[in-house]
Amino acid sequence: MATTADIRNGLCIEFNGELFSVVEFQHVKPGKGGAFVRTKLKNLKTGKVIPNTFNSGVRIEIVRVERRPYQFLFKDDSGYHFMNTQTFDQTFLAGELINAPGFLKEGQEVEIVIHADTETPLTCELPPFVELEVTYSEPGLRGDTATNTLKPAIVETGASVNVPIFISTGERIRIDTRTGTYYERVKS
């Protein structure tokens, strides 16, 4: 068993019967009283982030997880289908386990976090940025550049993203999958 001294960002632990990932932590040694560790924990099933404080030296249960490379194949009624790029095994996941399913494109490389003891997939993480082509956007008004105006655009996966008014149909843009927002235009 590990203690609170072993806590670090990205560590997966079992807490209150559920699996959590440590998003942020801080060791605090107040002038009066015992030391403690203030954390933010992300539930791997629901994605909800909760704050929690552990007293210093408390035992925690570390869960062994593995990150495996997969390639997205297609989506149908049963879920999203992926293929392991090393063993060529296929698996499918529900949309709730994927951090940004609207930006998945066929053939795209992703990482699936798998519980090593039970071999069950926990989450699917896209790369931080993806490049997609804009399939539809309203034309921007000429001369309307005084403010940082955004307009909706539809990308090739069918997702809607707010983009600056100078982006037009057919251009490639880079999207931040963590926030689901426009990042920059891709130059050819």
Image: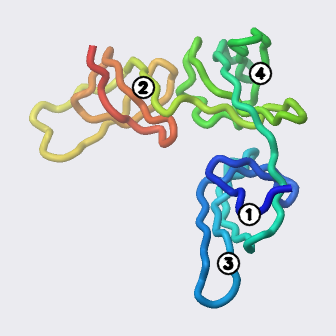
Q: Which residue is mark 4?
A: 92
Q: Which residue is mark 2?
A: 154
Q: Position of residue 120 (x, y in %)?
A: 84, 32
Residue at position x 58%, y 13% in the image: 106
Q: Is residue 68 above or below residue 6?
A: above
Q: Which residue extends farthest bottom?
A: 32
Callout 3: few (<14), some (14-19), or many (20+) C-alpha neighbours within 10 Å? some
Q: CA distance from mark 1 to mark 4?
A: 35 Å
Specify few, some or many for label 2: CA neighbours under 10 Å numbering under 14, 14-19, or 20 or more. Answer: some
User: Local crowd at mark 1 within 10 Å, few (<14), some, or many (≥20)?
Assistant: some
* Depth order, front residue of 28/72: 28
Residue 141 location, x and y as percent?
A: 17, 32
Q: Earlier in the sequence, mark 3 or mark 1?
A: 1
The residue type indicated by label 2 comes to Ile
Task: Answer with mark 4 or mark 3, whichever residue precedes in sequence.
Answer: 3
> Which label sits on residue 35?
3
Image marks 3 and 2: residues in contact by CB distance under 8 Å: no
- Of mark 1 and mark 4, the one earlier in the sequence is 1
Answer with mark 3 or mark 2, whichever residue precedes in sequence: 3
Tags 1 and 4 touching, CB below 8 Å: no
